[in-house]
Amino acid sequence: MPEPDDLRRPDSLTVASRFNGPPESGNGGYVAGRLAGLLGGHPAATVTLRQPPPLERPLQVLDADEGGLRLHDGGTLVAEAAAASDAVLDDAGFEPVDPVTFDLAAEASAAFFAGRDEHPFPTCFVCGTARAEGDGLRLFPGLLPQQPGTTATPWVPDASLADADGARVRPEFVWAALDCPGAWTVLGTDIPLLLLGRFTARIDALPYVGDRCIVMGRLLGRDGRKVRTATTLYDPDGRIAAQAEALWIAPRPAEAS
C-alpha cells in the first residue's frame, strides 16, 4: 500500500542560505540534523559529510543500505546518514561534558566575543559574530580557564527555531547547537580552521523556546589533522537534553585558501 503523501520521505532537501557555515555552504551540524531527521524517528544518528553542502538548490535524498540515506548534488555524494545503535554510541564516547552555571557560561561567552579579532567564518549560522539576534544562533563558546580543552556558552533559543506548535526547538537546530562548541575547543590555538567530517548525535529532549540552556564542548583528542570533540546540551534544570561526538578535519593550507 502506498504511503500517504504527508508521510512520504521527501526526495530532496534544500539548505537555505540562512543556515550557512562557511559562506558558500551549509553549517555541518544543521545539515546533519536535517538529513538525520529523515531517517524516521531514531533518537540518535551518525552523519558523515563528504563534501561541503551547497546552498539554495535541491539536493537529492536517496536510500542507502540498512535503512540509511545518502544526500547527492547531482553525481556528487554530499553526505551519508545512518541510525546509531547503542553500541555505536558507546564507541563514540558519549560521556557528558560536565556543566557549569549559566552565569559562568555567559562569562566564558563574553570573553570569546570581546577577544575575537578574527573568525574563520563570521557569518556562520551557529557561531558567527556577524549574525544578528534572531538570525543566527550566536553561540560564542569560550574556553574555561579552570577546565583546559573545555568550552561553555549559554543558549536561549528564539521563536524562529520553534516547531509547528511554536513551543519546542526543532531537532535540526539542536544538532546545529551541538556543532561549533566542539570546534572552538581548539580553534584559535594552532588550528585556524576545522571542517566537520562525521557527527554522531543523540537527542533526549528538545528544549523549549526561551529556555536558559547551556552548551558544553570538550576536546577528546587530536591525531594529525583530525580532531575529536564532544558536546553536551543541558536544559535549565541541569538535565542532559542532547549529546554529540564529532570528528573534525583541519584542511591543508592549500585547501583552506
Image (cartoon, helix red, strand yellow):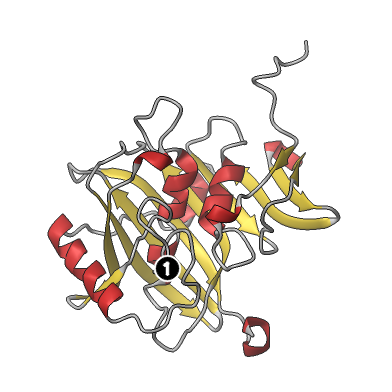
Q: Residue furthest right?
A: 75
Q: Position of residue 164 (x, y in %)?
A: 46, 27
Q: Is 41 situated above or below 124?
A: above
The residue nearer to you, when weighing 174 against 111, is 111
Image-quadrant location for residue 197: bottom right
Instruction: Left or right? Give the position of 236 relative to 204.
Output: left
Which residue occupies 59% across, 31% down? Answer: 40
At mark 1, the secondary structure is loop
> Label 1 is placed on what type of residue?
Ala
Q: Position of residue 35 (x, y in %)?
A: 61, 44
Q: Is 208 situated above or below 21?
A: above
Which residue occupies 57% across, 51% down? Answer: 32
Instruction: Left or right? Give the position of 229 relative to 42.
Output: left
Instruction: Left or right? Give the position of 211 relative to 92.
Output: left
Q: Is residue 86 visible?
A: no
Quarter placement of the N terminus: top right
Q: Is 149 situated above or below 38?
A: below
Q: Position of residue 158 (x, y in %)?
A: 34, 44
Image-quadrant location for residue 106: bottom left
Which residue occupies 73% across, 50% down? Answer: 57
Query: What residue would you read off at disc 1?
Result: 130
The residue nearer to you, when weighing 220 against 31, is 31
Q: Is 42 situated above or below 216?
A: above
Quarter placement of the C terminus: bottom right
The residue nearer to you, when weighing 103 against 218, is 103
Q: Residue furthest front?
A: 132
Q: Position of residue 159 (x, y in %)?
A: 36, 39
Q: Is residue 98 visible?
A: yes
Which residue occupies 54% across, 54% down? Answer: 19
Other-residue count near label 1 (Cα within 10 Å), few / some / many at <14 / 14–19 / ≥20: some
